[in-house]
Image: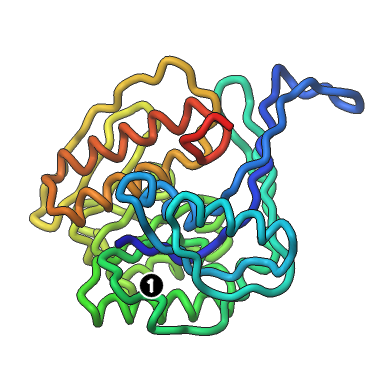
Amino acid sequence: MLCAVGDLIEDIVVQLHGEINRDTDTPAAITRRRGGSAANVAYFAAKLTGRSRFVGCVGDDPLGDSLVAQLSRHGVDVRGERHGRTGSIVVVATTDGNRTMLTDRGSATELRAFDPTWFEGVQVLHVPLYSFSHEPLRTSARTAVQAARASGATVSVDLSSTALIEQLDAHAVRALLDDLAPDVLFCTRSEADAVGVRPDRRFSARHVVVKDGARPIRVLTSDGAELGFEVDAVAEVVDATGAGDAFAAGFLTSLAHGEALADCVERGRTLAARVVMLPGATLENQ
């Protein structure tokens, strides 16, 4: 089973119909979705395998109740803490499929406790870089990685955001990755450039997966190889929110089943291609 540690928050997806009209109305379609990078990965993994687990702090409020219920309905076992206020992200999607995120994480960074039972039966632990941005979540995420290592589980980390790398400082992120030594490291090309990922600098990862939009996916492997995988064009990109999380879920669930690297990439990109055709990080139309 895959377990993801981090945020469960609300995504408010604003799909613009054109350019923003300053100081007046701008037509848009607005959709509310369950979000948070870790929760997204858990959701997609459950859709693929029937079950997964999410660990995090969710606000003790009606919005938190709703988001937890949504995840649970899709086969995600939600663990962690409930207190404070549930966060939200406003995702502004332009007509070309690009997006800008306005982030209020609420109490998502307030995971304080560690319960070993949260990680029973876990074969893959996935932790976005967001989970190392603030205390006490940062310490809880580190403890989760240590527990996963002790149990023999695969550990994966996603670099998440160039803005976050800049906020934390690239040198500090490199030190963190050296310490975590993830089995799998996911990043975009810009995130890879920001921390200096290269074939001889993989931070001990067996696989470094570098995504680059419509350009080929590069995978740097532990034997020094650099492999390229083409990305099929998507007819209509509606919103890229959650595409990277879907890719990670597809890749990791295939890896856990012992599938070949090419099959792991294929499953990830196929799932991501479905997600970008819908608003928000989801496989459902409603």
- For the residue marked with disc 1, what is the amino acid? Ala
> Residue at the spot x=86%, y=26% of the render?
22
Q: Which image quarter is the N terminus in? A: bottom left
62 relative to 264 in the view: left or right: right
Left or right: where 194 falls relative to 101: left
The one nearer the camera, 171 or 133, is 133
In this view, 182 is above or below 163: below
Q: Residue 12: where, in percent of width, then height?
A: 68, 41
Mark 1 nearby-residue class (10 Å; few <14, some 14–19, many ≥20)? few
| 194 to 243, vertically: above or below | below
Q: Is residue 65 left or right of residue 96?
A: right
- Where residue 147 appears, as percent x and y from the top left, is 32, 81
Residue where numbered disc 1 is placed: 175
The C terminus, quarter of image = top right
- Occupied quadrant, residue 2: bottom left
Where 185 sits versus 83, above or below? above
Q: Secondary structure at mark 1?
A: helix
- How far from the left and from the top, in percent, is residue 59? 68, 67
What residue is drawn where x is 65% and y is 50%?
A: 10
State the residue lying farthest toward the front: 73
Q: Is residue 19 left or right of residue 225?
A: right
Residue extending farthest to the right is: 23
Percent coordinates x, y for residue 244 in the rendering: 42, 43
Residue positioned 58% across, 72% down in the render = 134
